Amino acid sequence: MKGLIVAAGQGTRLREKGALKPLIPIRGVPLIERVIANGKEAGIDEFLVVTGYRAEELQERLRDFSRRSGIHVTSIHNRAWDRANGVSVLTAKQFLDEPFLLTMCDHLVDPDILRRLIQARQEPGTVTLGVDFNIDDPLNDPEDVTRVKCEGERLRHIGKVIKDFNCFDTGVFRCTPVMFDALEASQARGDDSISGAMNVLAEWNKARVFDIGDRLWVDVDDPIAFGKAEALLDEGRL
């Protein structure tokens, strides 16, 4: 299976840790390399990385990583990197005509989450989002995560500020090419985000959720989350 990683934004909230977010080292290993390594461990055999901000620098580092590791990495440049993350995903449309795993360059995820999502049954023409039902004592900032309302395996609504929710978006999706149709439909409405596409898929009854159980994930987008990720790495839990 191929893996698509969004790595186009500036990452301004982590600027104190480094100038280019995907290359910020965490316990000596750049974030993007940890994300790729986790995906490789889970069974992804080829990666596509959408670059944007300071693309040439990131692309050169990815070429070097690919040579060192032997992992196939293709860079795709999103010239409109300052728009929402769905634009980055849509940039990869011409490269993906099969099921693929989608994740973010700053989400450190237990490889078992990825492995189980890859192995899970998926209905044709749907997109499945990994969700975390631990909303009472979450590891990630509850004011910053994206909220999800689901009923059984069906995703009904997703957004940062929705009030009726029962789980959190982990930023890991098992996609089919219908994701690109939904992104285009969402953008036609003026919403460039991945969440916007998932809401379109929910309307089409093509959005599903997958419970990650007690597995851990961290959205490393600010210094506090960075510290949590370091601690979990030190403990061997991530």
Image (cartoon, helix red, strand yellow):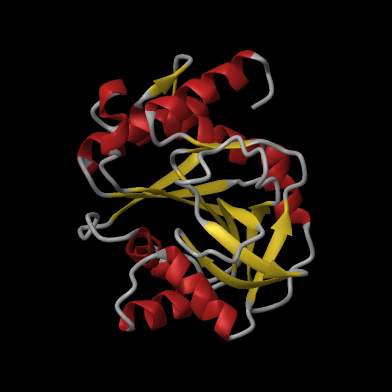
The quadrant of the rendering that contains the C terminus is top right
Residue in the image at 23% along x and 28% along y = 19
The foreground one among 167 and 58 is 167
The image position of residue 159, as x and y in percent, is: 48, 64
- Can residue 13 be seen here? yes
* Residue located 60% across and 46% down the image: 45
Residue at 40% x, 70% y: name it. 94
List x then y, in percent, for residue 77.
27, 54
Please identify the residue farthest to the bottom as the structure is shown: 204
Name which residue lies at 65% across and 54% down. Answer: 131
Residue 202 horizontal/vertical position (percent): 58, 78
**In what quadrant of the picture does the N terminus appear?**
bottom right
Find residue 195 and report its horizontal and vertical position in percent. 46, 66
Q: Nearer the viewer, residue 163 or 40?
A: 163
Is residue 1 among what the camera can see?
no
Number of callouts in the render? Answer: 0
Task: Report whether 123 appears left or right of 183.
Answer: right
